[in-house]
């Protein structure tokens, strides 16, 4: 829960490049002994033990311009997503449906296993079992989509690593950098340099 709330808050900071002062932050679990990390990250002391997790901010924050707002990125994303879907969905019914579902949600958001299961009117466990029968899992499918999307974007000079990290919903560019190197053995910059040399 800490990671999710922190990611949403820091995404707002990165998209706007402006301060986003929080007026209230509530979390559902008991308070830890040391609250210094919470104050350092969010600027306020959270309330703990609530029925739901949320934070409140000024309405004006919703009017901040988005740093990465770019219709051209959206158009390019949709074309690449369609190409990758056609490449990856052959032969496996549930895997294909889930890939299509995840791609339809991007770049707006990266759906969780729970959200995906709800979209198919089943429990997360049932969806995982169906995927397991096809030799895969939600985590593997979502990672492979992100990897293929990242490779496609890196072949185009106009998209920075920060753009790609943002579109693929990484908490920060360094998280994208680390994931890509784990997948391929290369940094995004190294992969782009190799691909562009072969063009």
Image (tube, helix red, strand yellow):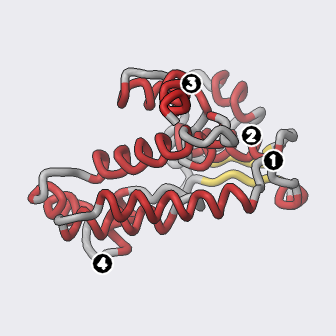
Residue of label 1: 67
Above or below, 178 against 105 in this view is above
Density class for disc 3 (Cα within 10 Å; few <14, some 14-19, many ≥20) is few
**Between 80 and 130, the one nearer to me in the picture:** 80
Mark identifier at residue 189: 3
State how far apart marks 2 and 1 are (Cα): 8 Å
Circles 2 and 4 in contact, beta carbons < 8 Å: no
Left or right of 149 in this view: 11: right
Q: CA distance from mark 4 to mark 3?
A: 41 Å
How would you rate the neighbour count of disc 1 (Cα within 10 Å): few for under 14, some for 14-19, many for 20 or more? few
Q: Earlier in the sequence, mark 2 or mark 1?
A: 2
Query: Element under label 3?
Result: helix
Q: Is residue 29 visible?
A: no
Q: Residue at x 44, y 31 (%)?
A: 180
Give the number of the mark in front: 3 or 1.
3
Q: Nearer the viewer, mark 2 or mark 1?
A: 1
Q: Position of residue 121 (x, y in %)?
A: 30, 78
Q: Which residue is the site of mark 4?
A: 121
Do the CB atoms of the residues marked 2 and 3 lie less than 8 Å apart? Answer: no
């Amino acid at each position: 829960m800490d990671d999710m709330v922190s990611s949403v808050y820091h995404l707002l900071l990165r998209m706007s490049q402006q301060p986003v002062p929080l007026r209230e932050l509530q979390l559902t679990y008991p308070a830890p002994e040391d609250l210094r990390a919470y104050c350092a990250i969010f600027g306020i002391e959270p309330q703990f033990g609530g029925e739901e997790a949320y934070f409140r901010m000024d309405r004006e924050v919703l009017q901040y311009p988005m740093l990465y707002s770019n219709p051209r990125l959206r158009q390019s994303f949709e074309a690449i997503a369609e190409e990758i879907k056609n490449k990856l969905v052959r032969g496996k019914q549930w895997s294909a449906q889930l890939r299509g579902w995840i791609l339809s949600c991007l770049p707006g958001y990266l759906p969780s296993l729970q959200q995906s299961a709800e979209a198919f009117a089943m429990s997360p466990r049932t969806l995982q079992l169906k995927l397991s029968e096809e030799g895969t899992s939600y985590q593997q499918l979502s990672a492979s989509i992100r990897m293929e999307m990242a490779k496609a974007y890196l072949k185009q000079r106009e998209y920075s690593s920060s753009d790609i990290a943002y579109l693929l919903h990484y908490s920060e560019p360094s998280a994208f950098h680390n994931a890509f190197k784990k997948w391929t053995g290369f940094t995004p910059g190294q992969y782009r340099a190799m691909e562009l040399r072969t063009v």
